[in-house]
Image: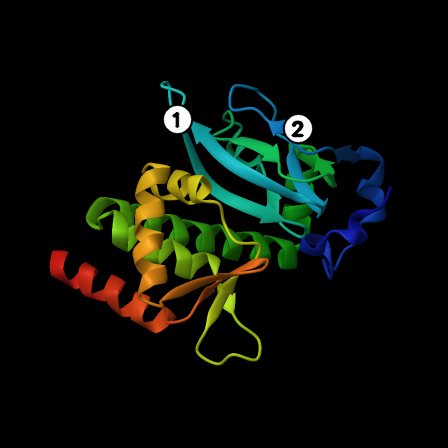
Amino acid sequence: MGDLGRVPFFQDAGIGLDRFAPRLHWRRFVTGEVLIDYEEKSTDVFFLVAGEVRVLVRTQAGREIILDDMRAGEFFGELSAIDGIGRSANVAALTQGEVCVVPAAVFRDIVFSAPAVADRLLRLLAQRVRELNARLTEHAVLDLRHRLYAELLRLSVPRGGHPGERVISPPPYHHVLAARIGCRREQVTREFTTLSRDGIVERTRGALVLRQPELLRDRVSAAMREVG
């Protein structure tokens, strides 16, 4: 299967990682498999070596809210390993892949014995808190339209060879975007119709292109100022 050297988070740890290998578990998963259930009591940390997963919560009414999508190189489950409290979300596989499962005790041993890893963890947790704060603020003060703009900007990356444009690949499904920003799929579809008509976004083969990302960013900023 592999060793911790395959996990980006532990690279250049400054300590010998071989001694932890016997306490690890390597696991392959298939599309649709639930890796973490909200109701389970486990405290393991999962490091994605290959594949993609989705982090989400379900309301009592059965509505899904997507918190994040993660790819190889990222990890999840660290909160339960840190505080010993139950899981805060479900994690399901979007593709087949592989994870390195690190028991909480092992994770803590590595973090406490490797300052470089501890610093990496603190910085990542701070980044996640900042991102969560930004999303909470958007949900509290922005309407559907501007929440969608903000989410498109967050999901996109610069488009190579096309200065000023950004791209999301593969293009997100409307129901997925709706679950990320807390609305219905039909509402997202209506907004996309307007954005496409105005030449602000364009769906190409295998990607969603943001033709005018600065316009979207300006609109979000203006909406935030109006409620400030």
In front here: 74 or 200? 200
| Residue 63 shows in this picture | yes
Q: Is 203 placed above or below 177 here? A: below
In front here: 100 or 64? 64
**What residue appears at the point 31 percent right and 51 percent down from the top-left corner?**
191
Question: What crowding class fits label 1: few (fewer than 14 Cα within 10 Å), some (14-19), or many (20 or more)?
Answer: few
In the drawing, does residue 210 fall left or right of residue 170?
left
Question: What crowding class fits label 2: few (fewer than 14 Cα within 10 Å), some (14-19), or many (20 or more)?
Answer: some
Point out the image quarter for the C terminus.
Answer: bottom left
Point out the image quarter for the N terminus.
Answer: top right
Q: Earlier in the sequence, mark 2 or mark 1?
A: 2
Q: Which secondary structure, mark 1?
A: loop
**What residue appears at the point 85 percent right and 47 percent down from the top-left corner?**
18
The x and y percentages for residue 15 are: 77, 55
State the residue position of label 2: 33
- Residue 170: image quadrant is bottom right
Q: Are marks 2 and 1 in contact (CB under 8 Å)?
A: no
State the residue position of label 1: 63
**Which residue reaches farthest front?**
197
Q: Which secondary structure, mark 2?
A: loop
The x and y percentages for residue 138 are: 28, 50
- Of the residues shown, which amino acid type is indicated by label 2? Glu
Q: How many marks?
A: 2
